[in-house]
Image (cartoon, rainbow, N blue to C red):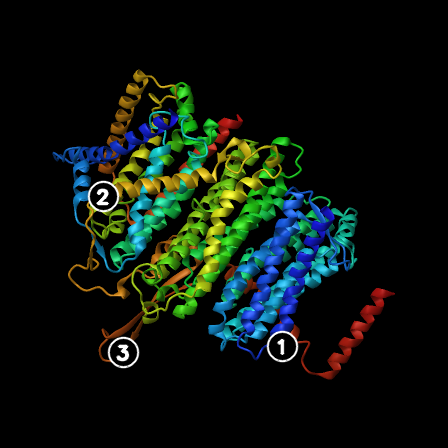
């Protein structure tokens, strides 16, 4: 029986891995037919489905403890020992593929003049395979190969519409991702003692003999490499440009899943270290919190809907990485009170990884659906869509609330775990008390800003009156554009109800714990998603009953908005820009926002007849203070080097001779 | 029995909520040398609003109609979990401090959505301001809640208040005075009182809360006004319960205890209403664009309270 089921898991994983490649071949063979896209997406869906079943089967069979391991042989071709963490991240990939491919069946065809669909689907297939291979890789070399396949195919997703903006964003991404790749390769090779073909086991073995300095350097390199992929500040620069340029389904995969693969890479990389250097935890916490704050702040003032989501991804990855840093700090501490913090923090990391995947995938697809119907992503031009699409507005609202970590959605329970752990952890020692207090305060601010960003985005798109004729006369939403986001909403609630209790005590269910019991974290604080949902529902019913019996039952009179006796137009409403004006003002120095009144005279004779324009801009703090100085320095150096490159052949010959002499002198 | 007590306690808060608003208004009028309305006026006005016809703008969607229910629902939840008469009766997973904070935020968010779904600049402006305030008050709110939890070793509102009732006043309360001041800042901001907002006018220069609910009328307006009264009462009950824990008891409850608790509760509400009326009479409203100073001050006071608490804990 056991042999049989392990064979089934093996087959399903193999099918999930190979199907996208089958999709590539079919996509190219059938590219002249109109059903090409549907066919390829169906194959992707099958792949995701097979993978999800394999993963669920794996957990059902082996439990969700850390020790679960499974040998995947892919019909005897290879031998990969899969652990539960790998399967967990694989399931995120499969879930993402399933949802976004379902979405792509109807979302891509309207864009067939913008994207070359068969090519786009080939890039998607390689992207999906690359992510899976990155997670499955048993050795250093295959990992780097798979990572590169993932990165390069993501580049083709970013430049899919071949516009100038996309090419620029793609170029930025391409450069940054290869700097990151170089860091990762260097860091891992440093650990492996230069052995490119080492398996993870060998890498860990050779890391044992590495010097502390090499360990420290390797850690910083790995953090920079994986951090740049995960969009951590200050190497985040590419993310808000690149992610929104891809087709929406692909953006969902990039933001919802690829960032998690970067997280996976980092966790797997850190596991190879014999010990982590003492500064490392503080580095990771600091950079994580900085990313969370900066991402949330920029999300609150951004005007491009997809870019709001991209900044919010930076925020959420920052939250997760700050928790990873705390885990590094407390994990394995000899003090049992300190190491007791670790399981609760780990619970947050896992929950938030899942929750962010769920709501971010859903939101990218939902924003993509809005953009494809209204032909704009600019929040200032949207509005009033809730009257046209009531159900879709509800889905979007639920996803926004989930993203803002409000009850009763799963994200709230994840973040509750984090807050509660920090608060309880303050009792451990004075040092932890002080630092956790500051982290808690900063997290609350980040939470507040994220709340602002999502409320602003939802109300700018859906509430009030439509500002353009496109938005006023939108056609009904096709089913496959709202079904995947709706699944995300349901998944988000499910994550709170099921995942939260199950993951909080992986092994307790054999001992009679039920799903409906309280979830206790560090310090004995407890939470129960079922109770919260129950009280939400019962208060709702109670209010409905009151409304029915206590108040005036005549139907409401539909009138104009109160207008002081003068007709009001949609242009008089607050725009998203206006909505965030207080935040721009309060955080002026960090956002480097500037407002300027430009006065241009029209008539020479009369100084009073002028044209006035108000322009405002936000500058990237890191671009100004970090990237620009580096750019200036590079240019200065190249100007200096230019003196050597004066085109006189004798000088070049002299240089060659100098180089030869220098080489000989050093080698002999 | 426990459920009966929870229901009774929630009912007391729900029924006394308009009274608190009435007391603040009348006391404020007395400070201004006016006679002022009866303290029972809010009951009358809310009941009459319930009977009136509603008008709803044609530029709104279903969100506009859902808002009063969610806002009032979140206020109901606060009334349910705040230990105003008894502690230790609400399940510990429901009166958790961070859930409390999140439910307050949920109410604010929906109020903001209601203001945005009108197509009118008034509502939009109120929403923009309220959302900014709600976002920036979070750090002070969460830090002061965490400090209270840390000081008492309990993670629920009931446990926190219970701790204060069990110890002599001089031992329990003075260490958290700083935090209480921070909490007062939060209370004023969350309830749209001076110096953050002026609850008495519909003037565009001052308005936050009143601007958001400008388009609401009839039943929905009654629900929203009731919700804000409940929120004020609930937060006031927390504040006063910590400052003067007298009268709050754990089950089993005797009739005598119940009477003492009720009298003490109304006494505390009257004191709280007096304090708010006093504060509102001696200070002026701040300009909205100076709110960052207020929020920073609230945050630093809350953080100072936490620092004091940590020092107490480790020395």
Q: Is residue B218 above or below residue A620?
A: above
List x then y, in percent, for residue A501: 54, 40
List x then y, in percent, for residue B105: 38, 44
Dot 3 falls on which chain?
A
Q: Secondary structure at mark 2?
A: helix
Separation of residues labelled 1 and 2 (CA atoms): 65 Å
Q: Is residue A309 above or below residue A606?
A: above
Separation of residues labelled 2 and 3 (CA atoms): 54 Å
Instruction: State the residue in front, A279 or A328.
Output: A328
Name the residue that disc number 2 marks. Answer: B222
List x then y, in percent, for residue A507: 62, 37
Dot 2 falls on which chain?
B
Query: Which residue corresponds to the image point at 23% horizontal and 80% vertical from the top-left?
Result: A605
Query: Which residue corresponds to the image point at 26% horizontal and 38% vertical from the top-left?
Result: B229
Q: Is residue A159 above or below residue B165?
A: below
Residue A29: numbered disc:
1
Please state if A546 lies on the left or on the right of A581 as rendered.
Answer: left
Query: Which residue corresponds to the image point at 64% horizontal and 49% vertical from the top-left?
Result: A57
Choose the circle earlier in sequence order: 3 or 1.
1
Name the residue that disc number 3 marks. Answer: A602
Contact, mark 1 vs mark 2 (Cβ under 8 Å): no
Whether labels 1 and 2 share one chain? no
């Amino acid at each position: 029986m056991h042999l049989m089921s392990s064979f089934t898991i093996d087959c399903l994983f193999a099918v999930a891995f190979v199907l996208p490649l089958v999709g590539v071949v079919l996509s190219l063979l059938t590219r002249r037919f109109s059903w090409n896209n549907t066919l390829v997406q169906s194959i992707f869906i099958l792949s995701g489905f097979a993978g999800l079943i394999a993963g669920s089967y794996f957990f059902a069979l082996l439990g969700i403890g850390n020790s679960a391991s499974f040998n995947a042989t892919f019909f005897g071709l290879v031998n990969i020992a899969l652990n539960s963490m790998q399967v967990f991240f694989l399931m995120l990939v499969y879930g993402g593929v399933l949802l976004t491919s379902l979405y792509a069946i109807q979302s891509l065809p309207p864009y067939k003049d913008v994207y070359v669909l068969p090519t786009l689907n080939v890039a998607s297939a390689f992207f999906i395979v690359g992510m899976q291979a990155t997670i499955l890789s048993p050795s250093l070399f295959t990992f780097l190969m798979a990572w590169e396949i993932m990165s390069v195919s993501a580049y083709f997703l970013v430049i899919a519409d071949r516009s100038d903006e996309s090419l620029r964003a793609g170029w930025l991404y391409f450069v940054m991702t290869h700097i990151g790749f170089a860091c990762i390769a260097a860091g891992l090779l440093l650990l492996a003692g230069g052995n490119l073909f080492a398996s993870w086991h060998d890498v860990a073995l050779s890391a044992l003999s590495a010097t502390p300095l090499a360990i420290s350097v390797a850690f910083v390199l790995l953090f920079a490499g994986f951090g740049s992929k995960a969009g951590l500040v200050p190497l985040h620069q590419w993310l808000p440009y690149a992610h929104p340029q891809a087709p929406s389904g692909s953006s969902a995969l990039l933001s919802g899943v690829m960032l998690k693969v970067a997280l996976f890479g980092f966790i797997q990389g850190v596991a190879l270290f014999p010990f982590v250097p003492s500064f490392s935890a503080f580095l990771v916490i600091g950079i994580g919190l900085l990313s969370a704050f900066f991402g949330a702040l920029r999300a609150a003032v951004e005007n491009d809907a997809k870019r709001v989501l991209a900044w919010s991804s930076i925020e959420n990855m920052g939250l997760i990485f700050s928790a990873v840093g705390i885990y590094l700090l407390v994990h394995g501490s000899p003090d049992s009170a300190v190491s007791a913090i670790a399981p609760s923090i780990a619970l947050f990391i896992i929950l938030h990884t899942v929750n962010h995947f769920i709501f971010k995938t859903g939101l990218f697809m939902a924003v993509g659906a809005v953009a494809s119907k209204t032909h704009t992503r600019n929040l200032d031009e949207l509005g009033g869509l809730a009257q046209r699409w009531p159900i879709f507005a509800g889905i979007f609202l639920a996803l926004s609330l989930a993203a803002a970590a409000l009850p009763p959605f799963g994200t709230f329970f994840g973040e509750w775990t984090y807050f509660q752990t920090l608060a309880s952890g303050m009792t451990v020692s004075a040092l932890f008390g002080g630092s956790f207090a500051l982290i808690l305060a900063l997290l609350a601010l980040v939470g507040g800003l994220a709340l602002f960003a999502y409320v602003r985005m939802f109300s700018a798109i859906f509430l009030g009156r439509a500002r353009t004729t496109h938005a006023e006369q939108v056609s009904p939403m096709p089913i496959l554009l709202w079904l995947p986001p709706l699944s995300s909403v349901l998944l988000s609630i499910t994550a709170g109800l099921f995942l939260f209790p199950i993951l909080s005590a992986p092994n307790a269910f054999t001992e009679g714990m039920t799903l409906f019991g309280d979830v206790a974290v560090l310090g004995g604080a407890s939470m129960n998603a079922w109770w919260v949902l129950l009280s939400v529902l019962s208060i709702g019913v109670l209010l409905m009953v009151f409304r029915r019996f206590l108040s005036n039952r005549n139907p409401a009179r539909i009138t104009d908005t109160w207008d002081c006796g003068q007709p009001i137009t949609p242009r008089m409403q607050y725009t998203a820009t206006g909505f965030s004006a207080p935040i721009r003002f309060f955080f002026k120095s960090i956002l480097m926002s500037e407002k300027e009144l430009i006065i241009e005279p029209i008539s020479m004779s009369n100084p009073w007849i002028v044209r006035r324009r108000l322009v405002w801009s936000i500058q990237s703090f890191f671009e100004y203070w970090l990237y620009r100085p580096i750019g200036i320095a590079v240019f200065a150096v190249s100007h200096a080097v230019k003196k050597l490159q004066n085109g006189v052949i004798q000088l070049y010959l002299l240089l060659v001779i100098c180089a030869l002499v220098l080489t000989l002198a050093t080698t002999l | 029995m426990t459920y009966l007590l929870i229901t009774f306690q929630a009912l007391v808060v729900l029924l006394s909520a308009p009274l608190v608003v009435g007391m603040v208004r009348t006391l404020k009028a007395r400070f201004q040398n006016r006679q002022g309305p009866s303290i029972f006026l809010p009951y009358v006005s809310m009941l009459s609003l319930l009977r009136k016809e509603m008008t709803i703008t044609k530029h709104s969607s279903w969100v506009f109609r859902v808002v009063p229910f969610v806002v009032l629902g979140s206020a109901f939840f606060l009334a349910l979990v705040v230990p105003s008469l008894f502690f230790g009766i609400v399940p510990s997973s429901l009166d958790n401090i961070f859930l409390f904070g999140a439910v307050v935020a949920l109410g604010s968010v929906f109020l903001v959505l209601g203001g945005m779904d009108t197509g009118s600049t008034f509502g939009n402006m109120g929403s923009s301001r309220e959302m900014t305030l709600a976002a920036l008050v979070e750090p002070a709110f969460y830090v002061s809640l965490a400090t209270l939890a840390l000081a008492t070793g309990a993670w629920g509102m009931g446990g926190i208040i219970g701790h204060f009732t069990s110890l002599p006043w001089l031992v329990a309360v003075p260490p958290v005075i700083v935090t209480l001041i921070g909490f007062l800042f939060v209370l004023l901001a969350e309830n749209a009182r001076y110096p953050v907002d002026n609850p008495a006018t519909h003037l565009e220069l001052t308005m936050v809360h009143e601007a958001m609910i400008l388009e609401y009328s009839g039943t929905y307006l009654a629900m929203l006004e009731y919700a804000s009264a409940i929120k004020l009462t609930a937060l006031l009950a927390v504040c006063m319960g910590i400052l003067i824990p007298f009268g709050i008891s754990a089950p089993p409850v005797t009739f005598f205890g119940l009477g003492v608790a009720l009298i003490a509760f109304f006494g505390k509400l009257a004191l709280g209403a007096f304090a708010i009326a006093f504060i509102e009479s001696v200070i002026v409203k701040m300009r909205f664009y100076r709110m960052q100073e207020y929020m920073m001050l609230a945050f630093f006071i809350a953080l100072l309270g936490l620092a004091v608490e940590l020092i107490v804990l480790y020395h």
